[in-house]
Image (cartoon, coloured by chain):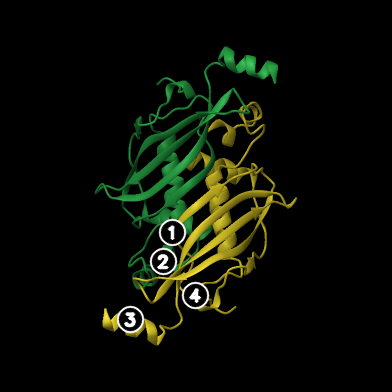
Chain colours: A green, B yellow
Amino acid sequence: MNLLYLEDLAPGQHFSGGVPIRIEDGRVRTFAAEFDPQPFHLDDVAATASVFQGLAASGWHTAAVSMRLLIDSDFKPAGGIVGAGFDELRWPLPVRPGDELRVECEVLEVRPSKSRPEQGLVKLRTTTLNQDDKTVQISVGNLVVKRRRISSSDLNEGATE
Amino acid sequence: MNLLYLEDLAPGQHFSGGVPIRIEDGRVRTFAAEFDPQPFHLDDVAATASVFQGLAASGWHTAAVSMRLLIDSDFKPAGGIVGAGFDELRWPLPVRPGDELRVECEVLEVRPSKSRPEQGLVKLRTTTLNQDDKTVQISVGNLVVKRRRISSSDLNEGATE
């Protein structure tokens, strides 16, 4: 797998994940116990009576698993996957124990940094899907990606300013 | 602690957390190994050479801990903390092993749902700070919050449409 630099990326490019990750019932509960201890993530009876109508993984568990799926995908920026921040993060459907998740992503925008000629920002939409191809998470993140080379015009600009 | 309904919330209200959570070195590495296995979250030497200039917690670890801090705060909506999605999620500074994190939050917007008179949406900005009062995460989320009662005008509206 070749590492990707800013010059290799363009809007409309798609990347996808490797092996789907299965969300285990026990891990839903231990993740929730540590980070999001609310009844609908921990207890079957309470979950059935809640807005989720059954045990659901914490959205932050889904987000963390989605990151792992992205790391294991064919999207391999040279400096790693470094998020400057997200413009959007949504969970349209609950994730249930036993679900198998995968990710697909699309480059939305690529722009060189004006202040730091050695890098740029890539806006990436990552969609997490379950085994029925239903979307369980959508994120739009801005990633810091290295440039392969600095053009002479950038260097001249830097030298004259 | 009284549970909060939509009617109890208004823009400008502040809520804050209880006991700060210390980010343990070992947990930074085990969280990263499971969900975000990149060198700058796992290995001291690689981290020193990276954009983070030292071992840094995964942003998703910070997000998960921030959720736990919010759960333990005095912000207690009646139906639990249920996020419909986020408009913003940023990590202005890295979180380091040994940091002690706390949250502060502010209600930005409160609006009853038009289609579901029993609930509404609350836009909440949550700021995660470290022991030096530096901001390590900012999120702006939209939460689904129950209404205490349905006004007669809502019922009339429902009956005539």
Q: Position of residue B121 (x, y in %)?
A: 46, 67
Q: Which residue position is annotated with label 3? A: B157
Q: Residues within 10 Å of mark 2 (few under 14, many from 20)?
A: many
Q: Nearer the viewer, mark 1 or mark 4?
A: 4
Q: Residues within 10 Å of mark 1 (few under 14, many from 20)?
A: many
The amino acid type, in three-letter code, at marker 1 is Arg
Look at the numbered disc 4 and give the secondary structure of its residue: helix
Q: Which residue position is annotated with label 1? A: A29
Look at the numbered disc 2 and give the secondary structure of its residue: helix
Q: Residues within 10 Å of mark 3 (few under 14, many from 20)?
A: few
Mark found first going from the N terminus, 3 or 4: 4
Q: Same chain for marks 1 and 4?
A: no
The amino acid type, in three-letter code, at marker 4 is Leu
Q: Which residue position is annotated with label 4? A: B6
Mark 2 touches mark 1? (CB < 8 Å): no
Residue found at x 33% / y 85%: B156
Look at the numbered disc 3 and give the secondary structure of its residue: helix
Q: Residues within 10 Å of mark 4 (few under 14, many from 20)?
A: many
Report the side of A100 relative to B15 (left or right): left
Q: Nearer the viewer, mark 2 or mark 4?
A: 4
Task: Measure the C-alpha gap from mark 2 to mark 3.
Answer: 32 Å
Q: Which residue position is annotated with label 2? A: A40
The chain ID associated with circle 4 is: B
The chain ID associated with circle 3 is: B
Indicate whether A38 appears above or below A60: below
Report the side of A23 relative to B87 (left or right): left
Task: Measure the C-alpha gap from mark 2 to mark 1.
Answer: 10 Å
Q: Out of B4 and A42, give the one closest to the viewer.
A: B4
The chain ID associated with circle 1 is: A
Q: Nearer the viewer, mark 2 or mark 3?
A: 3
